[in-house]
């Protein structure tokens, strides 16, 4: 039995639309958020959960954390059905919703943490140890006495994450935790998640649109679209199907040099730089490099893989999402 | 239970942060008090009523001092429900009703105590006929205090019912506008219930709104004789049970159908 077991999950919402001119009643529309979703996650896994906006990712997280009741289907997390045994279930999980706040706005975050300690009945000694550990890993030391409203977005996110982990949850749901963070904060957050996963064996389900997050953290990724699971496996394997082109950027000693390219390679110029887009399956990279070297002395050259966001976009397009 | 107490404490702390609002509130309530008293004095000058003017003045001051117990809704809480921030509270191993009850009670209690103490000091310094009078007796004061505590529980339960409706309608303004009007009139804030016609009073004093401040104030002034005190306190307790049960029922029902707003 897996740690998280999801079978044939379905959830629909009713959306009331604005009344059309001439009709008396508002139209109601049923939107299917999840249709027949099944998956399993083992203890200690770090799983990325991606899909375009409106695919049903947040709905899944809300069902798994006991907030929403699905229309049908079965879910067992550590042997418990979240929406039936909500209070016992939520004792063992931690949740971070990237665009919401759990800490109190006007009081120092330490006070909010104290409340969380009481809510989860964390023993005093354990709480102190855990808070020290988290405050150090998340660099919160000086901020503990600061009210949330005086913090920057990055500081707030770190504070929120600390709040979600105080009770040592075995399972952590992260819903877009790096939304709006700067590069330094993002890297720090990723380091921390890796550390938490390794040190405490915390199972993590990470929902995000930031593919860098996924490729830095998750060995496994699930793709959701139209409420269905479309892919479940490793990220490189997924990307290799869509990763069909490379870009070479060359700067020759003499800007006038015009390399002769084989069929299929597309050349463009940006000032002194020559940009060549090609498909490595058709034109092997060493051949192309040799050709360029023959054309004239090279001052500088870089070969770039395709942008990961671009790959995901073409994947979504192909899957008709 | 300790979690609920902690939520209460934290909300208490939060309320203490708004000292500017407190000073503004005190000045506003004092103005209201003085204007109302001037009005009733004018009324009494032309046509004295059965109820002595000192009782009316005391009634007005106590109503104004504890105004925040009646009309104050937790904006943060309403905002949470509207925007979907409630998602976090649903991930806590708690009863949501109890958690919010603690928050609401803390806000009403801190908000009104912070204002009531300075205001009552002020009102006691005013000349007779303008200022607040002493309680009818020491036992009357004790009964009034007990009544005030029950009133606080009662108003918190009422407010939590509004919250439960907000879960459903998402916009608190409609129901709040309606309930606030009922609250102001039927709790005796606009016109002391003691000045309503006797036949009206028979009905109004049985309603939950009369249990909030009207009941303890009458115990304080002695309009309700001590012999009546047990009946009044029992009536308050009865309403607390009914309103709490109704609130829990609504919360449980709406919680199951909840849709967390905003993705």
Image (cartoon, coloured by chain):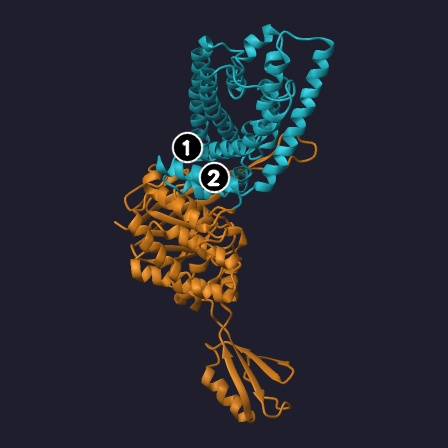
State the residue position of label 1. B98
> What's the chain of the residue with tag 2?
B
Q: Farthest right residue?
A: B46
Disc 1 element: helix
Give the colour of chain A: orange
Q: Which residue is rendered at x = 53% and y = 93% of the image? A: A294
State the residue position of label 2. B11
Give the colour of chain B: cyan
> What's the chain of the residue with tag 1?
B
Check the picture and name the quadrant holding the N terminus of chain B.
Answer: top left
Task: Choose mark 1 or mark 2, whichever is in front.
Answer: 2
Same chain check for tags 1 and 2: yes
Along the polypeptide, which appears first: circle 1 or circle 2? 2
Q: Where is residue A202 drawn, in percent x and y?
A: 32, 56
Disc 1 from disc 2: Cα separation = 14 Å
Above or below, comparing residue B217 to residue B198 in the picture: below
């Amino acid at each position: 039995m897996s740690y998280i077991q999801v079978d044939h999950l379905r959830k629909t919402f009713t959306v009331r639309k604005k009344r059309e001119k001439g009709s008396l009643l508002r139209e109601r529309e049923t939107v299917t958020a999840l249709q027949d979703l099944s998956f399993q996650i083992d203890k200690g896994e770090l799983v990325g959960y991606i899909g375009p906006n409106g695919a049903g990712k947040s709905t899944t997280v809300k069902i798994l954390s006991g907030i929403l009741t699905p229309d049908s289907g079965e879910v067992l997390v550590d042997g418990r059905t979240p929406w039936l045994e909500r209070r016992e279930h939520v004792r063992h999980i931690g949740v971070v919703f990237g665009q919401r706040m759990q800490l109190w706005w006007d009081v120092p975050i330490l006070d909010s943490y104290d409340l969380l300690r009481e809510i989860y009945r964390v023993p005093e000694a354990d709480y102190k140890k855990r808070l020290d550990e988290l405050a150090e890993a998340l660099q919160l030391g000086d901020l503990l006495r600061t009210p949330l409203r005086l913090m920057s977005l990055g500081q707030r996110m770190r504070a929120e994450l600390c709040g979600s982990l105080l009770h040592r949850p075995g399972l952590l749901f992260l819903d877009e935790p790096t939304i709006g963070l700067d590069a330094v904060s993002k890297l720090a957050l990723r380091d921390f998640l890796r550390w938490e996963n390794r040190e405490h064996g915390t199972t993590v389900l990470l929902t995000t649109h930031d593919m860098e997050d996924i490729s830095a953290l998750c060995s496994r990724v699930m793709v959701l679209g139209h409420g269905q699971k479309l892919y479940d496996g490793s990220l490189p394997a997924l990307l290799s199907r869509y990763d069909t082109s490379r870009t070479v950027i060359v700067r020759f000693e003499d800007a006038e040099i015009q390399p002769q390219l084989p069929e299929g390679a597309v050349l463009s110029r940006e000032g002194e730089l020559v940009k060549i887009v090609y498909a490595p399956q058709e034109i092997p990279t060493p051949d192309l490099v040799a050709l360029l070297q023959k054309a004239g002395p090279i001052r500088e050259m870089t070969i770039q893989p395709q942008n990961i966001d671009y790959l995901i976009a073409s994947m979504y397009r192909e899957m008709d999402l | 239970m300790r979690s609920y107490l902690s939520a209460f404490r934290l909300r208490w702390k939060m309320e203490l942060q708004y000292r500017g609002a407190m000073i503004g509130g005190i000045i506003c309530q004092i103005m209201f008090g003085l204007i109302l008293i001037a009005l009733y004095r004018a009324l009494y000058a032309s046509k004295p009523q059965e109820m002595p003017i000192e009782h009316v003045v005391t009634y007005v001051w106590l109503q104004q001092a504890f105004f925040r117990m009646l009309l104050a809704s937790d904006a943060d809480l309403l905002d949470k429900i509207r925007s979907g921030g409630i998602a976090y509270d649903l991930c806590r191993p708690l009863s949501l009703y109890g958690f919010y009850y603690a928050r609401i009670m803390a806000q009403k209690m801190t908000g009104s105590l912070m204002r009531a103490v300075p205001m009552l000091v002020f009102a006691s310094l005013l000349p007779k006929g303008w200022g607040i009078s002493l309680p009818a007796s020491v036992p009357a004061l004790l009964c009034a205090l007990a009544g005030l505590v029950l009133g606080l529980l009662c108003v918190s339960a009422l407010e939590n019912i509004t919250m439960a409706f907000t879960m459903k309608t998402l916009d608190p303004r409609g129901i709040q506008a309606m309930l606030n009007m009922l609250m102001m009139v039927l709790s005796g804030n606009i016109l002391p219930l003691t000045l309503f016609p006797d036949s009206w009073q028979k009905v109004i004093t049985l309603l939950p709104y009369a249990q909030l401040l009207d009941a303890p104030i009458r115990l304080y002034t002695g309009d309700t004789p001590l012999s009546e005190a047990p009946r009044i306190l029992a009536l308050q307790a009865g309403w607390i049970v009914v309103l709490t049960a109704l609130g829990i029922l609504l919360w449980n029902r709406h919680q199951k159908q909840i849709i967390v707003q905003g993705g």
